[in-house]
Image (tube, rainbow, N blue to C red):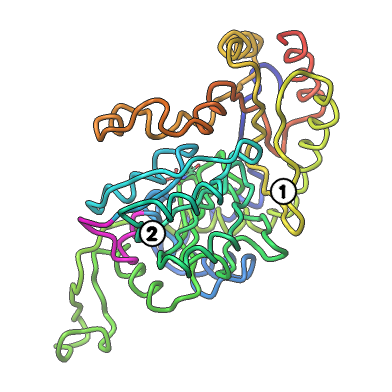
Amino acid sequence: MSGFIPYGRQEIDQADIDAVTAVLQSDFLTTGPAVPRFEQAVMERTGAAHAVAVNSATSALHIACLALEIGPGDMVWTVPNTFVASANCALYCGADVDFVDTDPNTWNLCTEALARKLETTDRKPKVVIPVAFAGRSCDMAAIQALAREHGFLVLEDASHAIGGTHAGRPVGCGDFADITVFSFHPVKIITSGEGGMAVTRDPELARRMERLRSHGVTREVAEMDGPTEGPWYYQQTMLGLNYRMTDIQAALGTSQITRIEDFVSRRHVLAQRYDALLSDLPLQRPAPDATGDRSALHLYPVVVDPGRRKEIFERLRSRGIGVQVHYIPVHLHPWYKKMGFAPGDFPQAEAYYAGAISLPLFPALSEADQDKVLAELTAAL
Ligand SMILES: *Cc1c(COP(=O)(O)O)cnc(C)c1O
C-alpha cells in the first residue's frame, strides 16, 4: 500500500468476492440460507449455543437490551471508553445509563471500580455492558461473580473481540455473559460490510432476539396466541424491528471467518513489532495479554503526553499516517452532558483519552508501512 496508511482496513480476497457473487446470482438477496450458515460458522468458532445475525452491532446491542427486558426505570452501566453505541442501546429502550471508570493499564472496565460502585450506589444496574476494548477481554470472570452477588445481567460488547480468547475459552462462548455482541463493520476483525451478531447460551433469549430482529413476528404455531389460521398465517407477538442481515452480507462474513485465525495472528505479529520498536519511546503501550487470554487486537492505542497529543496526531496525519483516537469518553458528548455528566466524572477514562492515539493496525499492514509509522512517530516525539 502506498500513500495514506489508515488505522484499520478490511482484507478482501477472491474467495470473498466469489462468495458474494454467488449470492447475487442466487434466489435470495435478503435473509435466506446464507444467514443461518454464517450464524453456524460463528457458533462453531466461538462455542456459542445460539447466534442471531443482524444488520449491525448497534442493532444487536438494541435487541439484546430488549431481550433482557430493559425498559423505562431500569439502570444500565457501561464504560466511558467505548463507542457511543454501547450506551445508546440502553437509551433506545428508555432506560437510564451510568458509567464505571476504566483501569489505567488495560483501559477496560475497572473491576474494583465496579465493585465499589455496586457497594455504594442507591440504584443498582439491571444490566452491565463491559466492552472488550481494542480486542482485549475485560476480567469477565470477576464481573460474572459480581453479577451473581448483586443480581445484574451481563451484556458483553465484544465488537472488537471476535477471534479472541478469555480464560482459555473463545470470546462469546457463553461462560461469562448472558449475551455477547460482535460487529462486522469493515474496520473490525472480520467484516460483512455492515453487520453484527448476538450470541448466547440461553435458548429463550435467542428466540426473543430472533423475533425482535424481524418485526416481532412469528410463524411458529407454538409461539402463537391461539391456533394458526392456515399456511399463510403469522402473528406479531411483540414490538420488533427490521434489523435483518442480508444473504450478501452473511456470505461475505462466512467467507471472512474462515481466515479469522490468520487475521488475529497477523495482528499479533504486528503488535509485537510495535511493542519492541516502541519500547524506548516516552509513551504507554497496550498491556500484555492476561494469562489465558488472547486479545483479538482490533486496535493498537498508545498514550502520549496529553500536552502534546494534538500536535503529534496532526503531524502524523500530515505525513500520511491515518492515526485515530479511540475513544472520546461517552459521558462527555453533548447528548450525555445534557443528562448531567461532566468532565471529572470518570478521571481514568478522561486521562487515557487525553493522550490516546491509535496507530495503524490491520492484517495487510506491511512491515515497510509499519516502519514508516515508527519513524514518523519517533520524529514527532
Ligand atoms: C463498532 C462498535 C460498535 C457498533 O458496531 P456497528 O456494527 O458499527 O453498529 C459498538 N460497540 C463498539 C465498542 C464498537 O467498536
Q: Position of residue 202 (x, y in %)?
A: 45, 76
Residue located at (81% from left, 37% from top)? 272
Upstream in sequence: badge 1 or badge 2: 2
Helix, strand or loop under label 1: helix
Helix, strand or loop under label 2: strand
Residue located at (55% from left, 69% from top)? 174
* Magenta region, residue range: 62-74
Q: Which residue is mark 2?
A: 127
Classify mark 1 as within 8 Å of ligand 1 or not, answering yes or no: no
Could you tell whether 41 is left or right of 217 in the image?
Answer: right
Label 1, label 2: how many angstroms apart (C-alpha)? 30 Å
Q: Which residue type does callout 2 highlight?
A: Val
Q: Are marks 1 and 2 in contact (CB under 8 Å)?
A: no
Say few, some or many: other residues with alpha carbon within 10 Å of mark 1 (under 14 / 14 to 19 / 20 or more).
Answer: many
- Count the numbered circles shown: 2
**94 is higher (above) or lower (below) than 49:** above
